[in-house]
């Protein structure tokens, strides 16, 4: 059982409360919206252990009290969403399991337009390994770990009378795990980010300076540090043209057996042509080279793409990034591609766990990497589409993620597609249909290939003003090169959700 919310959560709650209550009375007057809730679910599964050879059916009862809290003042905001998930007979064990689940974000302005602080925290259950993906806590905890994150970041935004503007930020964050047999360290990270740029009084000659430094201290493995600095000076040759010079230094330290990182000094000289606010091309040459094209032929379409060829820094060699966004009155389209170097801890800090009426509070993310302390490079392509009518909302997504782990050399490739249709077919009744497919491939010491297909349909009815009920059916089929990962599950769910 997991009864404890970490000390980081209590610290965040105290910090957010004290900051919102300080300052002049007119600025600190709070407007609190507190929404307690209770969610009760009865779940029947015909394969509660997710096994192909020893299937076991079971009824699982979920009793989950929770609260949503939003506090606003003239200087800050706090958003909190917390559940205490209670499960009886999860994995057919005839026991009670309790899980803390939380997402919180807070921000505060100490000095007008000068000094601020952001903070966030989360508690969620995550898959330990891509070798065994579970969709929630219903099927047990052997392959899950409870992840707690906390971050606080004060920052100062100096302004020097039109000569210069900037941001100076300090950040502390921590990631810890409990339960399950995972290789993820408890970590503490400190980072400093400095950015200064010329102010609006300088028109022909502009400049910018940046410095980014972070170090992550891992309890079970080597520490990781990332550091880079960059200076740029740019001169305008009229309305359409400008030339620039950039120089900087990269100094990164982490365990690696690849040549993707190269420390040292880098430089780039180049120019930009921007004949209108709908077209821009910029290119630079040096030991770090790049070409950027930005196009916006009309207001609803924007596309920017960059090709880089770097000798120094992270992701040396050829890399791409691209983002295209297109909107109409009823639809939106998005296409993105990026190549980055990161850590599992950073992905856990960045993700937002959420609460939904049909599936409960979810933190399990099937696209996260295996929980590891290794630094890895990732190539991420994502295409999404949404369409709205008066009573329907249709969403679809296709993604492909390729990861290379720096120390072990293992590769992970995740390819998937999903689609959903929300339809309010009467004033108080709606349906949700979802289809998903994901293929996970791992090459290395423990290579495997999994193919997962899932489908679900839920009907939700507003019974009373604050009481919703839903009935649903879900199906999961997973095929794998490992017999341990092969299973099929059918699940029926009845749910009552009460807002107090």
Image (cartoon, rainbow, N blue to C red):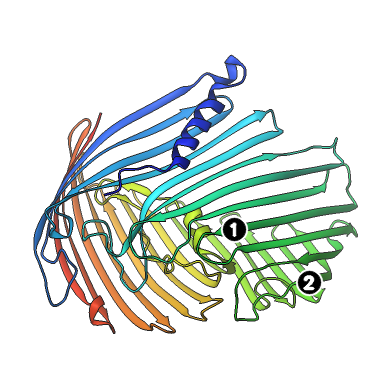
Label 1 packing within 10 angstroms: few (<14), some (14-19), many (20+):
many
Q: Nearer the viewer, mark 2 or mark 1?
A: 1
Which labelled disc corresponds to residue 264?
2
Left or right of residue 259, residue 250 in this image: right
The quadrant of the rendering that contains the C terminus is top left
Q: Position of residue 452 (x, y in %)?
A: 28, 73
Task: Using the numbered discs, state the Cα–Cα distance from disc 2 to disc 1 in whole angstroms.
Answer: 21 Å
Q: Residue 292's x, y, as percent? A: 71, 68
Residue appearing at x 66%, y 68% in the figure: 253
Q: Are marks 2 and 1 in contact (CB under 8 Å)?
A: no
Q: Percent from the top left, x then y, of residue 129?
A: 37, 69
Asked whether 208 or 100 is in front, the reply is: 100
Q: In this view of the protein, can residue 425 be seen by the observer?
A: yes
Residue 398 appears left or right of 318: left
Find disc 1 in the rendering and name its residue: 216
Pick out the residue farthest to the top.
25
In the image, what residue occupies the spot 47% across and 44% down?
A: 121
Q: In the drawing, does residue 4 fall left or right of residue 59?
A: right
Residue 24 or residue 424, whichever sits in front = 24
Q: Upstream in the sequence, badge 2 or badge 1?
A: 1
> Could you say where residue 35 lies in the image, as x and y percent from the top left?
33, 30
Residue most toward the front? 220
């Amino acid at each position: 059982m997991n009864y404890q919310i970490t000390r980081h959560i209590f610290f965040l709650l105290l910090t957010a409360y004290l900051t919102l209550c300080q300052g002049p009375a007119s600025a600190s007057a709070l407007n609190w919206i507190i929404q307690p809730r209770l969610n009760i679910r009865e779940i029947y599964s015909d394969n509660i252990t997710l096994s192909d050879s020893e299937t076991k059916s079971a009824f699982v009862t979920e009793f989950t009290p929770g609260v949503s809290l939003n506090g606003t003042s003239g200087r800050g905001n706090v958003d909190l969403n917390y559940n205490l998930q209670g499960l009886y007979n999860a994995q057919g064990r005839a026991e009670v399991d309790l899980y803390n689940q939380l997402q919180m974000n807070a921000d505060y302005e100490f000095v007008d337009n000068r000094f601020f602080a952001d903070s966030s925290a989360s508690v969620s259950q995550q898959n330990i390994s891509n070798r065994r993906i579970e969709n929630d806590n219903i099927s047990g905890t052997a392959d899950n770990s409870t992840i707690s994150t906390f971050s606080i970041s004060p920052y100062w935004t100096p302004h020097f009378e039109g000569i210069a503007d900037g941001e100076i930020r300090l950040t502390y964050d921590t990631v810890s795990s409990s339960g399950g047999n995972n290789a993820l360290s408890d970590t503490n990270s400190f980072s400093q980010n400095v950015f200064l740029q010329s102010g609006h009084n300088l028109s022909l000659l502009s400049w910018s300076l940046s410095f980014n430094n972070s170090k992550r201290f891992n309890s079970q493995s080597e520490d990781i540090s990332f550091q880079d600095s960059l200076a740029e000076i740019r001169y305008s040759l009229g309305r359409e043209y400008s030339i620039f010079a950039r120089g900087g230094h990269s100094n990164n330290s982490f365990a690696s057996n690849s040549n993707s990182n190269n420390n040292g000094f880098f430089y780039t000289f180049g120019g930009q042509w921007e004949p209108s606010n709908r077209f821009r091309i910029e290119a630079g040459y040096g030991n770090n080279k790049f070409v950027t094209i930005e196009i916006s032929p009309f207001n609803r379409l924007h596309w920017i793409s960059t090709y880089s060829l770097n000798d120094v820094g992270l992701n040396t060699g050829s890399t791409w990034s691209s983002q295209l966004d297109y909107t109409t009155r009823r639809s939106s389209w998005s296409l993105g591609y990026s190549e980055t170097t990161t850590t599992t801890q950073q992905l856990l800090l960045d993700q937002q766990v959420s609460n939904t009426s049909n599936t409960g509070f979810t933190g399990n993310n099937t696209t996260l990497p295996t929980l590891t302390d290794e630094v890895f490079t990732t190539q991420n392509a994502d295409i999404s589409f949404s369409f709205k009518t008066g009573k329907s909302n249709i969403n679809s997504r296709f993604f492909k993620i390729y990861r290379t782990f720096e120390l072990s050399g293992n590769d992970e490739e995740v390819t998937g597609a999903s689609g959903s249709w929300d339809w309010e077919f009467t004033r108080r009744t709606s349906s949700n249909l979802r289809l998903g497919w994901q293929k996970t491939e791992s090459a290395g010491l423990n290579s495997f290939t999994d193919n997962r297909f899932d489908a679900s349909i839920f009907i939700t009815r507003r019974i009373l003003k604050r009481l919703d009920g839903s009935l649903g059916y879900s199906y999961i089929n997973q095929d794998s090169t490992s017999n341990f990962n092969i299973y099929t599950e059918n699940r029926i769910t009845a749910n009552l959700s009460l807002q107090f």
